[in-house]
Image: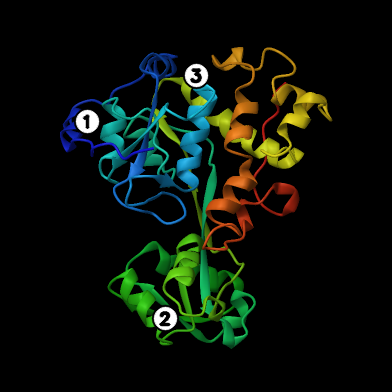
Amino acid sequence: MKVMQPIVLGAAMLLAATAAHAEFGDTLKGVKERGALSCSGHNGSYPGMMEVDDKGNWKGFDIDMCRAVATAVFGTAEGHLNIQSTSWEQRWPSLQAGELDIVIKSSGWTMSRDTDNALQFSRPYMMAAISYSTHTDNGAKTVKDLDGGTVCVQAGTTLERYAADHAAANGYKLEAVPFESTEAAKAAFLSGRCDAFIEWDLQLAVMRATEVKDPASITILPDVLAAEPLGMIVRQGDDQWVDVANWVESILIQADEAGVTSANVDEMKANPPTPAVATMLGVTPGVGKRLGLNDDWAYQVIKQVGNYDEIWERNLGKGSAYGLSRGVNGLIRNGGILYSLTMD
């Protein structure tokens, strides 16, 4: 997949008066007629979520979510997915202008975005967990082990408030050492100025993997201070299209729950272990018609993209440079928050 030319900022003017609304089924119909899904990318790299090499090839968790949606619609993402290089500021006007079909760009679900910009969010596909990193040699295993210590933090941010609120609510004290920027706070932590550094756990994992000579010298504590829900975003009004996004996500989680992987999906389809798996993989007919897709859409997604755990592990977990555990993004039966929806 190659990087498309950056989207013109002039699209933002389309939002100046009234935000556009999509009609039911328009987006899926338009995507099929065009023969490709336009999905947002980053104007650069966002490690673990969207990374582009010098040849314009993309990878990352968000990219795989784009691939999953394109595969559900077309049976394959190959030749049917355009990753549009889009800045943070461009993503909403570009979506409203129809230059994007869906935004999957590590975007948090907030009330103002949901209402003021006439956007529609899928259920969260990931929680951006706010956590602490610490120096391994101090022996801390949880945040309470940091009691009496210091935390480097960017001044005037929600991170500073998260640190103060969590300490007050959980009975420990941690002195905030404020800095003007995240980079300054991070540099101070790495130099040993503070006992801890607060950030999204993915950013902590990226720091550990890319900015430290010995990654084992940095520990990411398991405590979650706060979490921001990341969703897929479409234009307001096209319920069929947000249904497609929601069910693509749910099928990734359901396959994870059921142990259906890209490696064994053919075997599972040939001999489904449960009626739920038979429905999921299209052995029981009708599951695609409800969404305007082929009955084997979920089978193709799992076969070509993998289940949720496979996507996590290759982009963020053991198969990546970052080694991030799923934590709050684990299955609910494993202490996380993720669960699938029933396809009955």
Name the front one of labels 3 and 1: 3
Q: Is residue 18 above or below residue 217?
A: above
Label disc, if present, on residue 177 of the rendered structure: none
In the image shown, does 293 or 95 lie closer to the viewer? 293
- Amino acid on which disc 1 is placed: Leu
| Amino acid at circle 3 | Gln
Decide which of tag 2 and tag 1 comes sooner along the chain.
Answer: 1
Which residue sits at x=42%, y=57%?
47
Circles 3 and 2 in contact, beta carbons < 8 Å: no
Q: How crowded is mark 2: few (under 14 residues within 10 Å), some or many (20 or more)?
A: many
x, y percentage for residue 113?
A: 36, 39
Could you tell me which residue is drawn at 44 percent across and 43 percent down?
109
Circle on res. 189: 2
153 left or right of 331?
left
Front residue of 99 and 198: 99
Q: How far across and how far down the image is residue 131, in percent?
A: 52, 66
Q: Name the residue under label 1.
A: 15
Closer mark to the observer between disc 2 and disc 1: 2
Q: Which residue does the image show at 62% across and 56% down from the upper left?
A: 326
Q: Residue furthest front?
A: 55
Mark 3 = which residue?
A: 240
Query: Around disc 1, counting alpha carbons within 10 Å, would you say few (fewer than 14), some (14 to 19), or many (20 or more)?
Result: some
Q: Distance between the residues labelled 3 and 1?
A: 23 Å
C-alpha span from label 3 to label 2: 47 Å
**Residue 308, image quadrant:** top right
- Circle 3 sits in a helix, a strand or a loop, which is it? helix
Q: How far apart are marks 2 and 1 (CA)?
A: 41 Å
86 vs 244, left or right, is: left
Q: Residue 58: x, y in percent?
A: 40, 45
Figure quadrant of residue 125: top right
